[in-house]
Amino acid sequence: MIISDIKSSLPKTKIMIMEPFVLKGYKTENTEENTNRWESFAKEVPIRAKIAKKIAEKYNLLFVELQSKLDEVSTNIDTSYWLSDGVHPTPMGHELIKREWIKAFNKLLIDRGN
């Protein structure tokens, strides 16, 4: 509803939808109290990402993929370098997200003719 309202009221407004993401971290890993915390995150975040992508497609909006990028950069370095607790970005995580956002924004400007 919000996207429809924005598109009808402000048709030249450019909108991007960013993919939800998660990595293993102290707030997402299993604990004695919550023995399947990671499994819950690993299941739910991709579902939400799929929904976000579907909304982007429905409204012809640019979808900024982040999970695969975070997975890629986390292969040789502890995930806490990028996401302090598995969910919230560190300064370097924000830098990575910023760079992906800028790439997407530049593509948006080129593809949409502005």
Image (cartoon, rainbow, N blue to C red):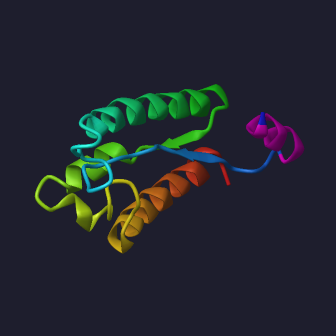
**Residue pictured at 53% horizontal, 28% vertical:** 51
Which percent across, then down, holds residue 39? 28, 33
Counting every numbered tag in the picture gives: 0
Residue shown at the point (39%, 46%) measured from the top left: 21
Q: Residue at x 67, y 31 (%)?
A: 59
Principal secondary structure, stretch drawn in magenta:
helix
Q: Nearer the viewer, residue 43 or 105?
A: 43
Q: Is residue 103 above or below residue 113?
A: below
Residue 90, compared with residue 7, is above or below; it is below
Asked if residue 17 lies left or right of residue 76, the reply is right
Span shown in magenta: 2-10
Asked whether, in this view, residue 49 is left or right of residue 62, the answer is left
Quarter of the view holding residue 1:
top right
Residue 112, x across and y down, in percent: 64, 45
Residue 49 is left or right of residue 72, and the answer is right
- Residue 11 locus on image (x, y percent): 82, 44
Does residue 61 appear to the left or right of 27 in the view shown?
right
* Residue closer to the observer: 92 or 44: 44
The answer to if 50 sits in the magenta stretch is: no
Quadrant of the drawing holding the C terminus: bottom right
